[in-house]
Image (tube, coloured by chain):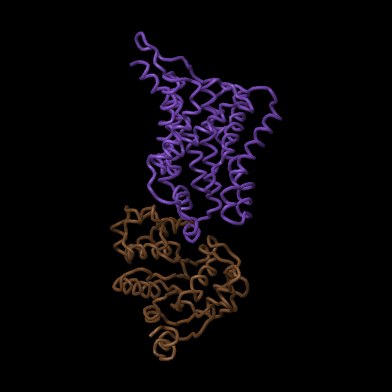
Amino acid sequence: MMKLFNTILIGITSGSIYSLMAIAIVLVWRSTRVINFAQAGLALASSFVGFEVLTRTGSFWIALPVALLAGAGMSAFIEYFFLRPLLKRSGDESQEIFLPIIATLGLLGVIKAILSFIYGDQNGTISPPVSDKDFIVGANSISMSPMRVLILIVVIVLVSSITWLFQKTSIGLALRASSYSPEISRLAGVRVDLIRTCGWAISGAAGSAAGMLQTANGSGSLSPDSLEFSLLLVFGFVAAVIGGLESLLGAVLGGITLGIFISFVLMYVSGSLVFISAFLILLLVLYVRPQGIIGKKVGRRA
Amino acid sequence: MSLVITDLCVDHGAIRAINGVSFSVSTGQLAAVVGSNGAGKTTLLRTLSGLNKATAGNAHWKSTNLLQAKPEKLVRKGLSHVSEGKSVIPELSVAENLDLGALWRRNKKESAQSKEAILSNFPRLGERLGQRADTLSGGERQMLAIGRSLMSKPELLLLDEPSLGLAPLVIEQIFQSIRDLTTSMGLTVLLVEQNAIGALKIADIGIVLNLGKVAIAGPAQTLIADPAVRAAYLGY
């Protein structure tokens, strides 16, 4: 019984981090119809920025917002100087589907290479700002530590702010309108190109938060060819697809679902099957509910 | 003359959709552009609002060159285009669709006044502010599309087939609203319609497009009354 409870707790914590990554992927997908594989590189690069700030100031609470800003800046930079000219110049529709995939994969490589060039074999460290020792209740230790509580709080705050931004502000209305219908939005006076860059920036911030929290929650070590970040990208992508790729709520539910599922595999089956099980659940969702758990059954809008 | 179009040519790939169109509309006039399918009516509007690129010619609204600017810039110059097929965003609420048209406006007090004025013109939108736009009837959606474009405080309104897919009674209402709005708000309107008679009845001037060229243009009443025009271009 205790094991079951702990499995779910672990799943929720790691799932909440996948949710952030899924949100990052969904935001880019909604604004430009691109799956940004460079998201892992952006998260990694901004976590390194966070690491540098942490080493100089000693404060996680300064490092986290700086990393978020760095992630937002880099993401907006990539959209403006890289993706936008690329998509403007691509000719037919088949190119429009393939080019961004190849381009963002290439970018992922470039970012990792730059980080390797700067850091070489040196690893960065982001240690947990609060204790990661599990709480003890009676004779049992439960899989929830001050650090995990902190992660949940940070994720809840970030997700609520993003939701508030999207639902209650002018820029949020412009972001939603531009993703549903760029043409009508332009005719209504919305600067759709600028709004897309904003969408990428928010996505970059969400991705870098995922990177920072994942590092602090996991080994604490940060290396330019980190497997952890590749996994984070894959899990974030799977979570986004489970959630239907279109909605923020879907991304959150997808992340938590995937987190709990993986945690069960880890605790009850085998640690070596984690990666495969993520793909299994992806296949299962695509077979049974290709529109995602809360997506509606509609074809892609032009 | 405030809207002046001279020798406008627009190509769709190898096809010349608009072939040397010239006409002008005075401030405060309602001009109906009629003609059969494929006459180039929609292309004309899309070019004027910056969605399509012109191949040759000129088009000016007062001092603004319409062929050089992007749609989102032209909105700020007082041009608003309601595109074909009930130009609303179905996933957004009625209120959000309206607000969308005024997002670029700095003066929020003025936008709020515009909204009030629009809701008093289309009271049915006021009752449905919180509903998603895809729950509206066809006529209500068209009202919302026009309302959204009025939120941008336009001086020149481009309307593409507002009667499309609507019941005859609703068409009459929409046409009447367009006529009333033109007069009460001092708008200049370019109304593109396949429903030629309905559009010409409320219009000041009429322009008949045929295969990308102006077949005939003149006062709307004259066009309706001319048996030759009726037989050749208006279909009865």
Identity of the residue furthest to the top in this view: A139
Identity of the residue furthest to the bottom in this view: B227
Rendered shade, chain A: purple
State which quadrant residue A134 falls in. top left
Q: Viewer-proximal residue, B163 or B79?
A: B163
Q: Residue at position x 33%, y 69% from top?
A: B166
Is B110 positioned to the left or the right of A46 in the image?
Answer: left
Number of numbered tags placed on the structure image: 0
Vertical relation: A233 (above or below) B155? above
Q: Viewer-proximal residue, A163 or B87?
A: B87
Quarter that holds the C terminus of chain B: bottom left
Residue B31 visible in the displayed image: no
Q: Viewer-proximal residue, B74 or B106?
A: B74
Residue A65 x %, y %:
54, 32
Q: Viewer-proximal residue, A186 or B15?
A: B15
Is A100 positioned to the left or the right of A154 in the image?
Answer: right
Rendered shade, chain B: brown
Vertical relation: A287 (above or below) A210? below
Residue A138 x %, y %:
34, 9
Residue B196 x %, y %:
40, 79
Q: Residue at position x 60%, y 52% from top?
A: A95
Residue B91 x %, y %:
39, 52
Residue A255 visible in the displayed image: yes
Q: Residue at position x 56%, y 29% from top?
A: A229
